[in-house]
Image: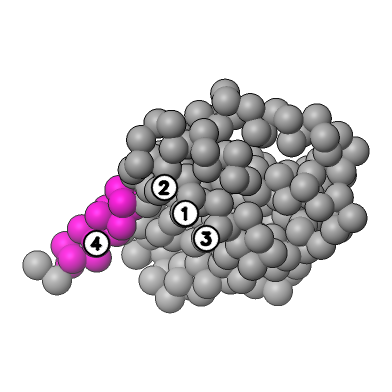
Amino acid sequence: MSHAIDIASEHGSAVATLFSFFSYFLTWWGAILLGALDSSLIFFVPFGTDAAVVYLCARNRSLFWLYPLLTTAGSVAGAAVTYLIGKQIGDAGLTRFVPERRLERLRKRVKEVGAFTLGLSAILPPPFPLTAFVLTSGALEVHVTRFLLVFAGARMLRFGAEALLARRYGRSVLRILESDTAQALAIGFVVVSILGTIFTIVRLWRSTARPKQ
């Protein structure tokens, strides 16, 4: 990973600092934390969790089975918290967290399909609105145990498939991930994640402050 940081340094100290910060997540505990953040209301990490799983499994191919488990555990924990928040605010409070147009589609889908199908949606990549989907499931009181079990299975299937590919093509994956192009893309994703998180925090703050006014 030092090679990645050196490349980031060539683009300026501020960018290097951001990339160095992201590199701390490329550990076993980082896999758990990224999984949890990916399912949370506030943090915005598109493809960050998937990239971390692929990199960790390619770098430590003997532990390829471990990182999907850790990431899934973190993701389920984050989803459980988001589900409970949705249950707490109820259907009436969803408009404070989810845009109205998206909310109507989510309500319809949650009401039409069961917990099993809902949980399987966790396998879908961005731009599928995973957090909003979990929040809506909680607000509409989808069966929590069944939902989280299927959610966990779907996430494990997604991360497990990525881990198997990373283990099989480990050296090639590392060469790609450590290329200049991949590093530039990674820097872009870090910046987008930070800006997206700031935007989400501001939107949530405004939505929760509005009723008080």
Q: Secondary structure at mark 1?
A: helix
Q: Which residue is mark 4?
A: 205
Q: Is residue 100 magenta?
A: no
Residue type at the position of mark 4: Trp
**In front here: 194 or 145?**
194
Q: Which residue is mark 3?
A: 37
Q: N-terminal of the two: label 4 or label 1?
A: 1
Is residue 201 visible in the rendered image? The answer is yes
Q: Residues within 10 Å of mark 2 (few under 14, many from 20)?
A: some
Residue type at the position of mark 3: Leu
State the separation of the CA atoms marked 4 and 2. Answer: 25 Å
Q: Is residue 202 magenta?
A: yes
Q: Are marks 2 and 3 in contact (CB under 8 Å)?
A: no
Tag in front: 1 or 3: 1
Q: N-terminal of the two: label 1 or label 3?
A: 1
State the separation of the CA atoms marked 2 and 1. Answer: 5 Å
* Residue at horizontal 30 percent and vertical 48 percent from the top: 199
**In front here: 50 or 107?**
50
Q: Which residue is mark 2?
A: 18
Q: Secondary structure at mark 3?
A: helix
Residue 123: give x, y in percent of width and height: 71, 47
* Residue at horizontal 40 percent and vertical 59 percent from the top: 42
State the separation of the CA atoms marked 4 and 1. Answer: 25 Å
Q: Residues within 10 Å of mark 4 (few under 14, many from 20)?
A: few
Q: Magenta stretch: give its range.
A: 198-211
